[in-house]
Amino acid sequence: MSESILKTPVVAGDTGGAFVIADDAAQTYIPFAISIAGSLILVAARIYFGSAAFISDGALMMLALAAYLIAAVFYLTNFYAPFRFAESLGLWAATLGVFFNLSSWLVRWVAAHDRELEIFRSQGRDAAEMPWLFRYVPFANLYDLSLAFAFGAGITTLLVMRRRDFRIIAGVSLPLAAIILVLARFIGDDLLDLPPVLDSYWRPIHVGIASLSYGVALVCFAAAVLYLLKDGLKVEKMTLWTGIFALSVFATISKFSVFAPASFGTYTASTFVGDSRMSLALRADIPYVGWILVVAAVLLIGAMFAFGVYLTKDDRASRRIGLGMLFGSLIAQAAAIATLVYQIKTIQNVLVLIDPMQYERFAVWMLQQEDVPQQQISQIPADQLIGMSANWIQQNGDRLHLSLNANPVELAALITAFSGTLFVLLFSIKTDRLRESLPSAKTLDGLMYKLGGIAFAGLALLLITGAVWANESWGRYWGWDAKETGALVAWLTYAGFLHSRIAYGWRGRRSAYFALVAFLFVIFTYLGVSYLLPGLHSYA
């Protein structure tokens, strides 16, 4: 009897999104088991053979990024031309992505131990005194968290893909996981020491829960996007929202200079001196990038206007014009990103790219770094401040350089805006056929609800463990720090998502919009606090 049940086909929608499929249940866990067991075997080999004869954690991360992108390509292709072999290749590419992703994090753990061991030996201390399990868990900075975040998204996707009609979700979730790894690549993979006040066994517990919860929230976001598509939301309306996001990115990156009247069309990047990891209050004008972004923005605005005409008047010609302009904006965004990366990596003479108008502000910044009182700084004449900056730059100008690690949020935001534009363009191709290939709206809604519930529970544990860790480190459970507040808002949004569904019966588009907004709060907590807002969590 039980054997016949296992072999009985399950119709999409019958389970409301439950994680079951028609195949043998044991076989559906094979990709999951391979990725986890393979990572454990690989890290054991790393411990046995040592670092000299073994692949680095950074190389493993790049392999994970490649595997996620390959899997995404197979599944995005499968949207329009379903092919069982391509689907199988996509599944195993996703499995490899999770394997490399987890392996990178585990190998980094071992590398952190080896680094500390070298420090102990150089100090003549007994290596037997070294703690192992908790001290070196790689959760010391945003790079470590990004690795774990991408793994959380990858492993959740792999578990969801146990059900064949849910494998299509990988076409949205895995590109997002790849973007997280791209961000990690530009953050930099240096092993850093935490301040002693944060060195606690609660750190890996708290940050581990955070990263896995964020991963679940990402897959919930992907399910919400596919639900809206299945439910008949016009792709042109999606373009309006992604266009607003992209324009917001263009308007706020580069210290608000691209569209500012005084510096219109100018993209500036942070500068560094010598081996310092701290960016200076001097920004270099990167040629061409700002104007390419202006072109991308103009084309995007034109596409949004054309789609608005199409939606209100059902004018097919406006839709064709809108698609053409949207494609042009996509090309311009790709050109801006490529130009930015190429020039930051190749520019040698940074000094000629710095506007002297920044000298006064730079002198103020230098004095602030030396803890000179603001009242005293305000009494210094402007020409004296400019002279201080000019002297400093004359002495250190040849040591100035640019780095892609300067502000990874800017580059990640540009890549995300590009990805959003790319997705709406893909969704506009054979949209009806794409909708037919998706599971039923009821099934996607059920999946979204379950993932939202897991994310809610994970964020609740995140707040609890964070409060315990904060009390141990700072002597208080809650202090309304920026990251604490952001995590609370994200959790309350998922609470609203569940409450509105249970108490008021909100389903479908309302729930999907809730899931989209909740994930945006998660992303803000993950990135915005670390780079944009001051606080105790800015160490990331």
Image (cartoon, rainbow, N blue to C red):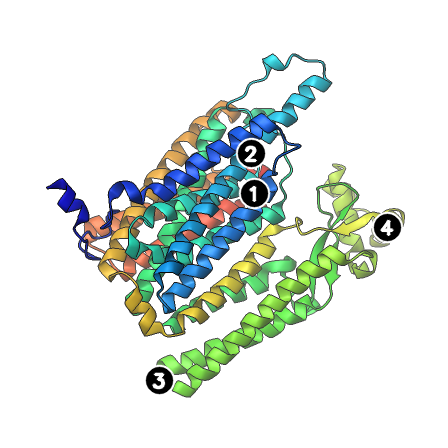
Residue 346 x/y as whole percent: 76, 57
- Mark with earlier residue (2, 4): 2
Point 43% across, 85% down: residue: 318
- Quickly name the residue at label 3: 314
Q: Which mark is residue 60?
A: 1
- Mark with earlier residue (2, 3): 2
- Mark with earlier residue (1, 2): 1
> What secondary structure is found at the residue carrying circle 4?
helix
> What secondary structure is found at the residue carrying circle 2?
helix
Residue 249 x/y as whole percent: 55, 61
> What secondary structure is found at the residue carrying circle 1?
helix
Inspect the image, locate mark 2, and give the three-letter code of the amino acid beneath it. Val
Q: For mark 1, does the 10 Å Cα neighbourhood hold few (<14), some (14 to 19), or many (20 or more) residues?
A: many
Point 70% across, 56% down: residue: 269
Inspect the image, locate mark 3, and give the three-letter code of the amino acid beneath it. Asp
- Mark with earlier residue (1, 3): 1
Work out how far the residue at label 4 is from the one at label 1, CA to CA, in angstroms: 35 Å
Q: Quadrant of the C terminus?
A: top right
Inspect the image, locate mark 4, and give the three-letter code of the amino acid beneath it. Asp
Residue 65 x/y as whole percent: 53, 50
Q: Quadrant of the N terminus?
A: top left
Q: Are marks 4 and 1 in contact (CB under 8 Å)?
A: no
Work out how far the residue at label 2 is from the one at label 3, CA to CA, in angstroms: 56 Å
- Quickly name the residue at label 4: 398
115, 86: nearer the viewer: 86
76, 142: nearer the viewer: 76
- Mark with earlier residue (4, 3): 3
